[in-house]
Amino acid sequence: MATWTTAVAWAAFLAATSWLAVTVNQVVPQPYMDEVFHVAQAQAYCRGHYWAWDPMLTTPPGLYIWSNLVFQLMHLATGQPIKSLCTVANLRYSNAALVPLLLGIVAAILRHHQQGKQQRRLYIEALAITAFPVLYFVSVLYYTDTGSTLLVLTGYYLALKRWHRLSGLMCLLSLTFRQTNVVWTVLIAYTGALQEFAHLPIDAAARDHICTVKAGQLDTLAHGLGHIWQTAKTLCPHLGQLLPSLLPYFTVGMAFLGFLLWNKGIVLGDRSHHLAGFHIPQFYYCAMILLGFLAPVVLRLNHPVRFMTAVIKFLQNGWQVAGCLAITAGMGYSIYQFTYEHPFLLSDNRHYSFYLWKDLYRRHTSVRYLMIPGYCFAVWLLARTLASRQTLTWCLVYVGCIALTLIPSPLLEFRYFILPYYFLRLQLGRPRQHRVTYEFALFALANFITLYIFLYKPFTWAQAPHAWQRFMW
């Protein structure tokens, strides 16, 4: 059981979140940025106009339905008309109300992964993960990311517990917040399949080969390919036994396919600025950004030296030298050929990604290529860390999900990295207490700085001198 100190820490965290939500509404009472569209649509729902739709919105109406349900309950409790309850402040509060639920589901997943470990540390770790700055920032505004993340992680937790019907339902509901969650449903379904396979009455050695052998134990390419082949050969004869458990996830896929046919595409509303591309460097940006946020947990002072040692050792074989050169050349070509500068990235100086691109990647053309060693180091360290904790096939499905969600998007947007972060961070076992403390301190500092700048350091545009603009992720 959690100690009273943990309970105090949770209470303080939730109290701070509540205070921030109130402060945001006092300082920024009007809808800001994408909130302009989300708030207007939610208020249309509050007026009962359920078929009205703003074509500028590109994500489904799950957030607005959630707020409408909250206000329906408030109406029953207080008698106030729903239209009068549906204010900007209350809409934001309905989103912030999801933070305690997110904290609870993160703690539940950690508890599942860390059975038998000290519970107090687990609950403090859950606080640190829930405070992930990119998501925490928009949790006190009116954005879809908090609800989307909560539903996806709830589906993941239920799959771990083998409650597949409920898991499938959560995955289906997550699609009402963000369409691309269908990709993460694949990872959740595979997680569920592994959980079911682990309980089949079959040969223990075959079961352990699939469910317990970590990717890091496969030290050569041949061993890795052999493991994949053996996994496929062992799983296929048992698909009939696994099918009933996987059926809810297939249902989600069929529902999504029906949506695609009905909508004639994945994007709702305005598609002109959301055309799919082949943005391979997104994968590299993701690796660097994930490493930045995970550094307190995974990075050691000797890791750069160990990376260089591993590279030098790898280059002692002629074929491996050729392979390394081919990979480097391939990365360079992908950067040259498939780097996109989305119009939104260059035209909106309110996002931090604007300054990342302007002050780093646009500083000189060579910077994009000089980053390749950094990308390689980030991928090496993250892959090495994940490989010590998950099976090879799970790792491959995870990477595939990242590729499917990021590479088609031409826009560099920090919020796209939220689910890749959460799925990776939740696999990392129990770091030492001081590392979790560093992680929480770093996130708390980042949240303080970004929210302080957002609230108290506004600026104006020459073309709109009377409207305050604010910096955000």
Image (cartoon, helix red, strand yellow):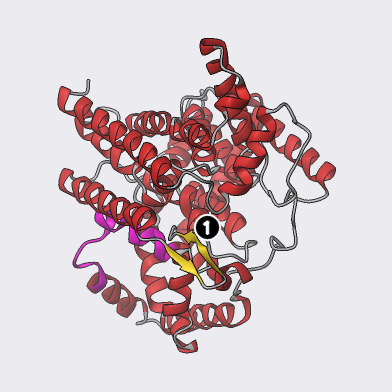
In the image, residue 350 lies at what x, y percent?
Answer: 48, 64
The residue nearer to you, when weighing 470 against 105, is: 470
Which segment is the magenta one? 287-304
Q: Residue visible at 55% across and 49% down? A: 397
Can you identify the residue that label 1 sits on?
225
Q: Is residue 293 magenta?
A: yes
Quarter-wise, where is residue 316 in the image? Answer: bottom left
In the image, residue 420 lies at what x, y percent?
Answer: 47, 51
Q: Residue visible at 68% across and 41% down? A: 60
Q: Residues within 10 Å of mark 1 (few under 14, many from 20)?
A: few
Would residue 446 appear left or right of 286 to someone viewing this image? left
The residue nearer to you, when weighing 151 against 473, is: 473
Q: Quadrant of the C terminus?
A: bottom left
SS assignment at label 1: helix
Q: Is residue 330 magenta?
A: no
Q: Quadrant of the N terminus?
A: top left
In the image, residue 86 lies at what x, y percent?
Answer: 57, 30
Quarter-wise, where is residue 170 in the image? Answer: top right
- Principal secondary structure, stretch drawn in magenta: helix
Q: Amino acid at mark 1?
A: Leu
